[in-house]
Image (cartoon, grey):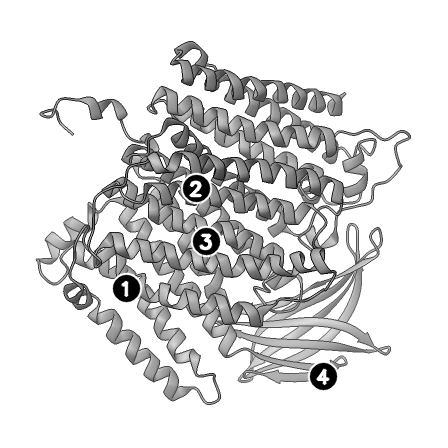
Amino acid sequence: MIAETGHFALVLALAVALAQVILPQIGAYRRDARLMAVGEPAALAQFLLVLLAFGALTVSFVTSDFSVYAVAQHSHSAKPLLYKITGVWGNHEGSMLLWILILTGFGAAVAFFGKQLPATLRARVLSVQALIGLAFIGFILFTSNPFTRLDPAPIEGGGLNPLLQDPALAFHPPFLYAGYVGFSMAFSFAIAALLEGRVDPGWARWVRPWTLAAWASLTLGISMGSWWAYYELGWGGWWFWDPVENASLMPWLVGTALLHSAIVVEKRGALKSWTVLLAIFAFSLSLVGTFLVRSGVLTSVHAFAVDPERGLVILGILAFFIGGALALYAWRAPSLKGGGLFASVSRESALVMNNLFLAAATVAVFVGTLYPLALDALTGEKISVGPPFFNATFVPIVLPLLLLVPLGPLLAWKRSDIYPVMQRLFFAAGAAFVLALVVAAFQEDGPWFAPLGMALALWLFLGAFADIAYRIRLGRTPVKEALRRLKHLPRPVWGSTLAHAGVGIMVAGIVGITAWRAETVAVMKDGDTLSIGGYDITLMQVGAYDGPNFRSEKGEFLVVRGKREVARLYAEKRFYPVQAMPTSEVGIYTTGFADLYVVLGDRRGEEAWTVRAYINPMAPWIWFGTGVMVLGGLISLSDRRYRLGVPFARRKAPSGAAA
């Protein structure tokens, strides 16, 4: 009965979503408060019903109910409990249910926290959000029902993909989906604004926290996926420009542009139409990513489904929402009045440049990702677009953007002067120049871009804190006064600073692992030693053991540096009998500035093994930098103004009233 309860809850959620789509929209059109009020309890009820369905599916996985098709296909009684739980979203049906749970959760959050929104805007936002829910609840009920029964039920299940049986994969998909789906709120606000025919600073203030929450979640999800690929796949890299990786990068780029564009709407009332368009495209690209992963057009470790029929349904949903939104935009956007004028040197101009570079970078990734698919579909010709294409197109676009990042926060609104701004960045520029000279002097065979890349990273990091130094009048006021100013800085200032500094840290990590990575391969027996980067790595032994649902051969490696033991690393070759699939578990020793990365390869004869070892300089900085970026987003999100939104009622107060 648990599966039937979950199925029935989804059917009820579909009915509630339908009511939530129609009644609040009619109420907003007629200015009927009673109909508009239906949206809030409906959004909460829809979320609770989907939560009940998700709970029922989770119970089915935990109890190994193999009469449920999804459980039988993607679980196994011998799996550890953690992977039974993660198996809920380690498949197409369950992951779509998680997708919908997060979608309805965002809608319920607006219903709960959006009391200060104008009634008509809130009703329309909840209606649009419910329309998205209606489409996807209908999709899983009619094409991907997670509660389909098997009769007779198999004795044992097929198990979860071994590559997904990893702690990072327990958290990577939920955060990734929270990012994908979170942009649905920006989409709903954009459509509601077009229906209302009004975009104002209050609208931007409400869009920003939802966009910021989605952006932070997507940043964390992408980062965790990159870390998982780094240590689980055994190839020593962190990004491969895989089409599904690109599918998550595209909405992140547009979401970043949206965050900055919304600032202009909030502060200056400008870029209204452009901001609405970015909100539409951020979620549209999330839908494109959903299509790529689930349509069967890609063969990837990330892909969940290989059913073209379900892909066609998702394509229809995608066409409806993207096509409908763009048609509405073409009709209503001209009625949105522009904001104030601004000079070519101003903060507004800097944010416009930011948006243009991010949009161009998104186009480069979009073309490189979808062109091979389109060519294959139209002509049958198969081509591969990999790192060389993206290095030649994406990198040249992003580099000038990164150079301009520290300038933006220091420019004044409406009109500014570049000379004083450069004076405030003099220390950051000087330090970056010195670092470039030092790196160039000490590197022997390193590539020419490495000194420039490290200088760019330091420029970003120090430039991020230049804004704070200027705000607290560092060096121009007594220390006590500077500390007082520091204490009272708004949280969004700290959040923006940390996010930009995190980009600098990440860039340093990317440059380090790209420029100075070292690799060696050897065939080793017990007692053999290989050397790399000043480390002597000795294979002590390779032993076999049985895990809960796998067999493993584990190699023990003694790592010595300068006659001193620094680590014992363990690298494994695992074999999962149920799926007849091998995986690698690598050994990593990190100093914080570099990783020693050891992989146990295939057996060579009776007693020898292929062993690969890498030195990955500054690799940990990639994920530390993204963590700092997420922290910055969360600090900004904690600001009271974002939690409460704009008190719209106060805008109608007399001119003499307190602001």
Residue where numbered disc 1 is placed: 463
Residue where numbered disc 2 is placed: 279
Residue where numbered disc 3 is placed: 253
Q: Nearer the viewer, mark 2 or mark 1?
A: 2
> Image quarter for residue 59?
top right
Residue 205 x, y percent position in the rendering: 32, 36
Q: Which mark is residue 98?
A: none
Q: Is residue 300 visible?
A: no
Q: How far is the residue under mark 4 from the one under mark 2?
A: 58 Å
Q: Is residue 317 visible?
A: yes
Mark 4 near mark 1, Cβ–Cβ under 8 Å?
A: no
Question: Which mark sits nearer the N-terminus, 3 or 1?
Answer: 3
Mark 2 near mark 1, Cβ–Cβ under 8 Å?
A: no
Q: How busy is the neighbourhood of tag 3: few (under 14 within 10 Å), some, or many (20 plus)?
A: many
Question: Which mark sits nearer the N-terminus, 2 or 3?
Answer: 3
Circle 1 sits in a helix, a strand or a loop, which is it?
helix
Circle 3 sits in a helix, a strand or a loop, which is it?
helix
Residue where numbered disc 4 is placed: 528
Relative side of 146 to 637, left or right: right
Q: Nearer the viewer, mark 4 or mark 1?
A: 1
Q: Residue at x 57, y 64 (%)?
A: 239
In the image, residue 602 above or below residue 659? below
Residue 530 x, y percent position in the rendering: 66, 84
Amino acid type assigned to the residue bearing label 1 in the image? Gly
Circle 2 sits in a helix, a strand or a loop, which is it?
helix
Q: How busy is the neighbourhood of tag 2: few (under 14 within 10 Å), some, or many (20 plus)?
A: many
In the image, residue 40 above or below residue 407? above
Q: Nearer the viewer, mark 3 or mark 1?
A: 3
> Image quarter for residue 212?
top left
In depth, the one of 626 and 179 nearer the eye is 179
Q: How far is the residue under mark 2 from the one under mark 1?
A: 29 Å
Amino acid type assigned to the residue bearing label 2 in the image? Ala
